[in-house]
Every structure is written in C-alpha cells, then in structure tokens.
Image: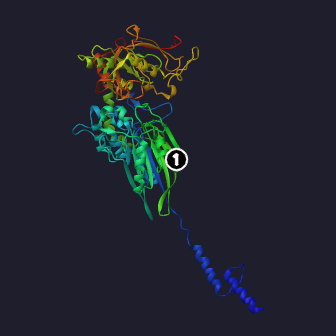
Amino acid sequence: MPLDRRKFLKKSAVTGAGVAIGSAAAAPAAQAAESASAKKPVKQPKRYALTVMGTTDLHGHVFNWDYFKDGEYSDAKGNTMGLARISTLVNKIRAERGRCNTLLLDAGDTIQGTPLTYYYAKVDPITAKGGPVHPMAQAMNAIGYDAAALGNHEFNYGIETLRKFESQLHFPLLGANAVDAKSLKPAFPPYFIKEFHVPGAPPVKVAVLGLTNPGIAIWDKAYVQGKLAFPGLEEQAAKWVPKLKSMGADVVVVSAHSGASGTSSYGDQLPYVENAAANVARQVPGIDAILVGHAHLEIPELKVVNEATGRTVVLSEPLCYAERLTLFDIELVFAKGKWEVESVAASLLNSNTVADDPKITKLLGDEHAKVVAYVNQVVGTATETLTTVDARYKDAPIIDLITKVQEDVVKAALAGTSYASVPVIAQASPFSRTSEIPAGDVTIRGLSSLYVYDNTLVAKLLTGAQVRAYLEYSAEYYVQTAAGAVIDTELLTNAGGRPDYNYDYVSGLVYDIDIAQPAGSRIKNLTYNGAALDDAQQFVLAVNNYRANGGGAFPFVASAPELWSESTEIRTRIAEWVTAKGVLDPKDFASVDWKLTREGTPVF
C-alpha cells in the first residue's frame, strides 16, 4: 500500500491530475515555470496610423475675400474660404498627429477662378522674363503640400503658363492620364511615393496616383490638340495601380480631378467618363482611398465596394474654394511580414472654425493689394443698375451686354472675309444669380462679376435648323409647368440638374419658350428680321470656347465649321467695350428677344 501510494503521487505530479501534493523536487520547479510564464509579455502586432489631408478646386482662393464684392467672403450658410484658413487647419492636424504621420494632397483646379489668378496669368504674368512666382505656388509651398493632381482649369491659360506654375512648385503636379499625344507617354509625373518611418518595423510606403479629367481635350482643345491626350481614368488607374503595388506600396491613394457621379457633360463626344472617381474605386483593385475633385460637391465619406476584391474604397470630396479639408484616417497593422490597411475613415473639417494663418496672409499681402487695386479701376459710368437677379427666367439687359460685345467683336473679326455678310448671333449664359453693376462708376470688378469664367470667343457657322435645335436643347433647362400652375422661380429652372451655365440666351432672334410643353417642343414663334426662321439660312454664332468645344453637349456647335477664334478673354472684351463707350446705357445693347410662355400666354 505505501509503495502503491508513492507511485500514484509521483504520476500525478507529472500529469497534473488535480492533486495538491507532489514530490519535493517537482513543486519548486513547477512554481518557477508558472512565475516565468506570468512575466513573459504577449507580443502585440505593430500598428501605424496615417492621416491624409486633402483639398480640391481651390480656384485661386488664398484669402477669405470676394474680389467681386470687394469685401470679406460670406454666404447664407456661414462658409468661409481660402488657403489661409486651410493652413490653420493643417497646422492643427499636424500638431495633433505629428507632421511625420501626415500627407497633404490637392485634387486640382488651382490656377484659375479669381481675379488674383487672372492677374498673374495675364496682367503681371508668371511667364514674363523675371516674372513673379504665382501666388498659389507661394501659398501651397508655404503650407507644405506633398502632391497635387492636375485639374482641367490648369490648362485655361495655355501649356506655357501651366509649365511655369509647375516649375515654381516644391511638390509634384500629377497626371497619369495626361499623356503626350504622339508617344502616349506621361507628360506629367503619374505618381508620388513617400515612406513613413515606424520604429521597430519596415517603413510604410504610401503611393499617390494623380488622375485628371478627359474633358480637357474638349474644353481646352485650342491649347492641347495635337500636343496632349487624356485617356480615361479607369483604364489608366488599372494600368498604374498594379505597378505601384509591385513597387511595394502599402497604401494607394488616388487624387482624382473627377466627380463621383459617373456622368459626363460632354455627351458622347468622348468615350471617357467625366465624373469617374466611383467607377475607378469599383473597377480597379488595390486602391484604399480617393480624394475626389471637379464636381464642387461636399462628400464627407462615400464607401464604394470594389467588384474584384470585395474591399471597401473610401472616397471624400472637400467642397471647393478651400471651404473644407478632407481627412482620411488610415489604420495599418504589420502582419505576416508586411503592412496591411486595416481600416480607412473619412471626414471633413470646416474652414469657418478657424482664423487665417498670419504666415499666409503676410506672405501674399502685397499680391492681394495689387489685385484689389486692379479690380477697382473705373472704366465707365452706368446710367442705371443692371443685375442678374432674374436673368434665369427673364431676358435681362445685363446678359444682352455680353451678347452685344460678342457680336461686335466677331463682326469686326470677319470684316473683309467671305463671311462678312452672314448675320452674327451670339450666345450667353446667366452665370451668376447675384451679379450687379450699380448705376454710377463701372469698375473691372463689376464687369468681372458678370463673366466669372476665363472663356474666350469663337465664331461657328450654323444653319437655321441647327440654331432651332440648339435653342430647344437650351430650353430643357426649365421644369415643365402646366398652364395655370403656380410659378415658383426657385423651382422653375435647373431641370434634370442642369446648371445655370448650361442655359443659353441667343441674341439676334426673337422666340418664345413654352414651358407647358415637354422638352423638345418648346421653341415657338422663332423669327429672324420679323420673318419665320428659314432652316436653310446661315448664321455665324459668336460662342464661348467652352460651348464651342462641346461643353454642355449642345447639339451641332462642336462639329460646326469654325470661322475664327481668339485667346483674349470675353471678360476683357467686355471691359474694352465699356471703356471705349465710356457710358454703359441699356439703349446701346438691350433688347427683349425671348420670353417664357405657357400655351401662348407670357409667364411674366
């Protein structure tokens, strides 16, 4: 019995069968092993948090300033704008998260959009020998951008101005789908790669792919045709993302000057989608986040599932004019010898929550003062106040001013040619709902607010039938409204989401737009010189280059014969016309050419 008990105890001490007593030698050894096990730390995986900040569609806004109103910018929603505010937000994020853990990107449309950018493209151009450094380059360099994508408006002043701006930047201007027209090789850097140091682990390698808008081939054809080509975002992303992954990119961010809607404003003129950012996310594997631009929308976070991998791609668009800053918070974990993106979340910061960064306002104070003085130059006197407040639905004299100037410029250009006797008509759009030229002194500022884009003038040859179709297409802008129904002017326009700049007046003709009728059969009583329009009659249409090249997908105009074009902005032509006249009097340019009706009865 004693022997059997000893055997049992010895066996139990080894197997751990729940006994409380073991051999004298075994007990201390077991206790030591348990103690060592308790002290041994559990190895945690390495983690890293990266913040990618983004802006887009800055359009020359450095300050919270409205050059057209000559005062601080404000709107009904309390928004503020300008890179000086963005700089403050960026400094705050860098202080919180460590500058070494952040990246700052832009998604394009930088050097066009305000009198500030116009001044340094045309009045005191950066391309002149010994010329200035562009204010946007100065501001973005000072803030410390890491990379920016090309926007379509980067091309508005020609390739020479764009290349000069590019040379002044301390960071790359990306455009994987901006290629040489002949070789089809990239004309700009396609991507940018940056490594982020992580103690005790390999660096995190982040690749940024830049994509721009195929519509450049249409909108700025005069500058890029035969020189640059702009293939689709989807196909170029599919080409470059695998290359970036093969180069060791742990994170792939796309900066895309392309909206997320999947739509195009240029109809079927190009085989490529204008607003393709969501398509890229859906179709191209390997992308983690997309900074969206071009559409001037506020998208805090949009999640799109990639069709091939099932992984979620996060998109964000931070409004425009530096009113918002996107934050992509990217969490990574180091597992199985490599970094993996664990999660991506996007959010927006509002620039109205902070003050201007004094470093930026001081840096560009002189440039700002020069432009303020320039836009406040008096060039004439107005006999009465002209406004665009109801120009969307009434033939407003202030829009007639635009068409009159365009008619005069084209007539002078065609004088002495075989087309000199062809009647000239002109189109213009109600770009702004708030533009006003007060009675009294007329300034460049006031005239610039009327024509906010840097469009130039083109002469196209159309037939009466084509003009009729053009007007029918334009009239689709109105919401069909039955005779007798109450008219709400806020709900009367923008049918199908069409923006104001894609509605055209056409001067030199008289016509009614019957909004009780369905789209396509609204133009009534269309006459020229008091007689019904002859479909075979030829007309010269004085048209802006955006429309002439197919912007807005108006019928016939893009393919119509081009008789003449120039590089001087329509805005400048308006200022020259007013300066030459000295007096801005509606009797010199205004006429009632069109009106809205319902079954023959005028709406207003």
The single residue placed furthest to the right in the displayed view is 1
Of 17 and 383, the residue lying toward us: 17
From this view, report whether residue 25 is shown above or below residue 501: below
Kind of residue indicated by mark 1: Glu
Can residue 184 be seen?
Answer: yes
Of 461 and 75, the residue lying toward us: 461
Of 120 and 262, the residue lying toward us: 262
Q: Whole-percent x and y of residue 493?
A: 50, 23
The single residue placed furthest to the top in the displayed view is 530
On screen, residue 328 versus residue 137, left or right, reads right
Residue that numbered label 1 is attached to: 307
Q: Whole-percent x and y of residue 127?
A: 25, 37
In the image, what residue occupies the spot 30% across and 17% down? Answer: 408
In the image, what residue occupies the spot 62% across and 83% down? Answer: 29
Q: Quadrant of the N terminus?
A: bottom right
Q: Whole-percent x and y of residue 410?
A: 29, 19
Of 4 and 80, the residue lying toward us: 4
Total marks shown come to 1
Classify mark 1: residues with Cα within 10 Å, few (<14), some (14-19) or many (20+): few
Name the quadrant containing residue 426. Answer: top left
